[in-house]
């Protein structure tokens, strides 16, 4: 039996990384595996009462170095009580690799440490949460984007870097839709997603597209005010957060996104699995699977004029909507079944590092 710890500095909420962790707990089960999910602050509700979910109390007004010392103390205490893992997956922040390595050294243990960050390494570094230097404490690295893979390969031998992307829940394939002028956006409504760029492009486009926005967040009210200011109320619909957002995209021909950065952009891959064309900024992760003209189109960040032009070209037939079957086939390699097969294979390899 392989014992795996997923070590996270923050509590789990509702989102992409939590969905992936949940997938691990459901598909890496006894008698072959035990996956222990350990959060260094409260937040295990998303795991629905999973037996091996643990969370520690958080402390307010604690500086970063003190926080890391507490993480080391907590994880060392956890191992002393419940036993050491065979593999520790240091997730979210690159600096968690240092935490896992410090505990391993203090306890004179021999578990393997695997880094698993969920956004751009450069963005973590910019935020003061560690970067490549901290990740080099790990024995191997799990990458969700080719950009992170390339970055690591400048410092680490190829045999220690594993690109897996993220698992995609393959949605029901919609072979044909009558919503030729219907667009959708799926995701949180926050500044980094730049939904305001999509609204501006809708306003600038010569042709009249309809947009359905599925999601909620701190920017929702501001976006609704922008919609009113641009007099787009008749063409923009806000549904709020939905348990299954893709049910509200069945009449759409394309998903539109304008994020400043992403880790993988799971919504893009899920949209393609339905057969939707994806129109997006060239964010990390997405550019690993979006092939312009085959399953989507790209426009530059913060460029509403370029997005408006793409929309006009699609409306007028100067650009074709992508073949729906080709869109689905382009992300099949990321399906949950294929993803879990790769993870199981990787676990076996990590034990022999």
Image: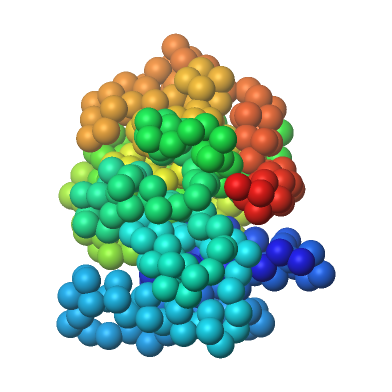
Splitting the image into 4 quarters, where does residue 151 fall? top left
- The percent position of residue 254, horizontal first and vertical second, equals 51, 35
In this orientation, which residue lies closer to the viewer: 104 or 67? 104
In this orientation, which residue lies closer to the viewer: 65 or 286? 65
Q: How is the image coloured?
A: rainbow
Horizontally, residue 59 falls left or right of residue 156, namely left
List the single residue furthest toward the top: 318
- Please tell me which residue is depicted at 41% across the width and 82% down the height of the picture: 74
- Please tell me which residue is depicted at 23% across the width and 35% down the height of the picture: 302
List the single residue furthest toward the front: 108
Splitting the image into 4 quarters, where does residue 178 fall? top right
| Image position of 56 with respect to 199: above or below | below
Horizontally, residue 156 falls left or right of residue 331, namely left
| Image position of 188 with respect to 13: above or below | above
- The percent position of residue 266, horizontal first and vertical second, equals 51, 47
Quadrant for the N terminus, please.
bottom right
In the rendered image, is residue 132 in sight?
yes
- Please tell me which residue is depicted at 36% across the width and 76% down the height of the picture: 71
- Please tell me which residue is depicted at 43% across the width and 32% down the height of the picture: 153
Count numbered badges in the picture: 0
In the rendered image, is residue 266 in sight?
no
- The percent position of residue 65, horizontal first and vertical second, equals 22, 71
- The percent position of residue 60, horizontal first and vertical second, equals 23, 84
């Amino acid at each position: 039996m392989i014992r795996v710890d997923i070590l996270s500095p923050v509590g789990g909420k509702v989102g992409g990384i939590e969905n992936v962790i949940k997938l691990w707990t459901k598909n890496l089960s006894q008698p072959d595996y035990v996956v222990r999910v350990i959060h260094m602050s409260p937040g295990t509700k998303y795991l629905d009462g999973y037996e091996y979910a643990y969370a520690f109390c958080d402390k307010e007004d604690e500086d970063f170095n003190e926080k890391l010392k507490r993480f080391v103390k907590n994880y060392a205490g956890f191992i002393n009580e419940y036993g050491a893992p065979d593999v520790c997956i240091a997730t979210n922040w690159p600096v968690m690799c240092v935490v896992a390595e410090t505990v391993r050294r203090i306890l004179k243990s021999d578990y393997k440490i695997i880094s698993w960050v969920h956004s751009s390494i450069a963005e973590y570094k910019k935020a003061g949460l560690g970067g490549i230097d901290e990740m080099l404490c790990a024995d191997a690295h799990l990458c969700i984007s080719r950009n992170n893979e390339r970055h690591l390969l400048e410092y680490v031998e190829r045999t220690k870097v594993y690109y897996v992307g993220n698992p995609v829940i393959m949605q029901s394939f919609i072979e044909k839709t009558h919503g030729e002028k219907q667009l959708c956006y799926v995701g949180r409504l926050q500044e980094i997603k730049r939904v305001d760029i999509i609204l501006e492009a809708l306003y600038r486009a010569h042709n009249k597209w309809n947009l359905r926005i599925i999601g909620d967040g701190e920017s929702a009210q501001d976006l609704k005010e922008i919609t009113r200011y641009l007099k787009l109320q008749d063409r923009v619909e806000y549904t709020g957060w939905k348990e299954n957002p893709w049910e509200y995209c069945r009449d759409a021909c394309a998903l539109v996104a304008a994020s400043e950065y992403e880790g993988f952009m799971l919504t893009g891959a899920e949209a393609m699995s339905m057969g939707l064309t994806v129109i997006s900024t060239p964010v990390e992760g997405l550019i690993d699977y979006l092939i312009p003209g085959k399953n989507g189109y790209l426009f530059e960040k913060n460029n509403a004029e370029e997005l408006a032009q793409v929309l006009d070209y699609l409306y007028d037939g100067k650009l074709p909507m992508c073949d729906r079957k080709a869109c689905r086939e382009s992300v099949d390699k990321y399906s949950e079944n294929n993803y879990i097969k790769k993870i199981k294979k990787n676990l076996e390899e990590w034990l022999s590092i």
